[in-house]
Amino acid sequence: MKSGAPKPKASPPRRPRPADPGREEIHLSPREWDPENQAGKLLEVLPKSGSVLVTSHDNPDPDALASCMALQHLIRARTSLKPRIAIGGILGRAENQALSLELELDLYPIDILEYQRWDGIVMVDAQPGAGNSNLPRSMPIVAVIDHHPQRQPLDLPFVDIRPDYGASATIAVEYLRAQEVEWDTKLATALYYAIKSETQDLGRRVAEADRRAHFALFDSVDWELMHRITKAKIPGDYFALFQRGIASARLFGNALIADLGEIPTPDACAEIADFLLRHEQVTRSLVLGRYEDQIVFSIRFTRSDLDAGLIASSLARDFGTGGGHDQMAGGRIELARTRLDQVESIKDVIVQRFVEMVGVAQYRPGLPLLSADVSETGSASP
């Protein structure tokens, strides 16, 4: 079994940039930040004994799952604690399900947390108050580790947020290397896949730290296991998502908007938003869907002139929550009983806000993607 944990000799990552004037403020932690010693500081704030939980956002993706695994491994290796991993929601994509099964993850259901006493909670790839976690408010959060922008003050013992990084798994790799904790092939494979998927093979929102972590893990990856995860079998209704996405997609200049209707998993919108963004004329995509009692939406950009995270937050204003990075973001709106008859009107508001904020309102009501005259009339860019 291959393993690895060479100590990094890396320049410290940049601190998060303040928001542009007139835009939503991005809050920065006032606490001293020392990239070479962050892992040690995390270990210092953990309780000396008791029950510790590692958790992330609901419906976790590979970055969330692998980062939780790595932090659990780090804490077990350097303390006497035996942390558990908890998640909310579901594992939607076939790849995420395969990752969980192949790596034999022991995941604790987050909805029963209140029935057990916890002495410390570590959140990774997520932040309290972001609206994408069902972690009970009463839980004692001692640490937050994330690569999403920090948009509200966090008065916690430990905060390590690096929005210039492409994946939270990269931070976790740096922690392991700094503490000289070795990884086995399963953990290496999970972390490698997390960085690979989160940055789209180091092609989207990638920092030098992501490249270093990617290559540090390379020799420890179980490639047969990786193949079983990336080529996991998928159910028949998965293909219907693409059919509905293409059929419902409308072209607004260089933006595509699609409504999937009822979706089998919350991350269906993200998958179709990524797919539609590959259209040769498109630099923005918005995909909406209804999952159980929620409206879910995902945004994807190929350019960084607008901040997708800030736009997602604005789209969900007055209805729910949204956020993310400059090029990939999303949101969800919980539908109370009194709003069940307002689903379509809420979706209409989200679409109208989006076309206005990305500068394509003049193309309303949009052209069907498969319209015969799209190439002539839908190619103009705002």
Image: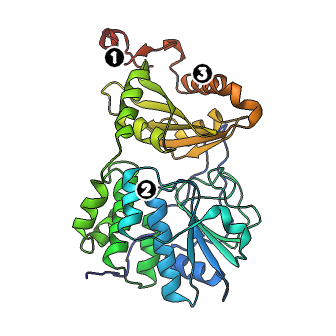
Q: Amino acid at mark 1?
A: Leu
Mark 3 closeness class: few <14, some 14–19, many ≥20 residues within 10 Å: some
Label 2 SS? loop
Disc assigned to residue 48: none
- Residue 299 locus on image (x, y percent): 49, 37
Work out whether residue 69 or residue 162 is closer to the camera in this orientation and state it: 69
Position of residue 375 relative to residue 84, above or below, is above
Say which of 111 and 259 sits in front.
111
Report which quarter residue 254 is drawn in. Answer: top left
Q: Position of residue 124 (x, y in %)?
A: 55, 65
Dividing the image into 4 quarters, which one contains the N terminus?
Answer: bottom left
Separation (CA) of disc 3 from disc 2: 30 Å
Q: Which amino acid is tagged 2?
A: Gly
Residue underneath mark 3: 352
Q: Is residue 17 visible?
A: yes
Foreground pick, 292 / 321: 292
Q: Which residue is mark 2?
A: 166
Q: Quadrant of residue 323?
A: top right
Task: Say which residue appears at 47% left-offset and 76% top-offset.
Answer: 175
Which structural element holds mark 3?
A: helix
Mark 1–mark 3 CB contact (< 8 Å): no
| Image point (27%, 63%), residue name | 226
Q: Is residue 277 visible?
A: no
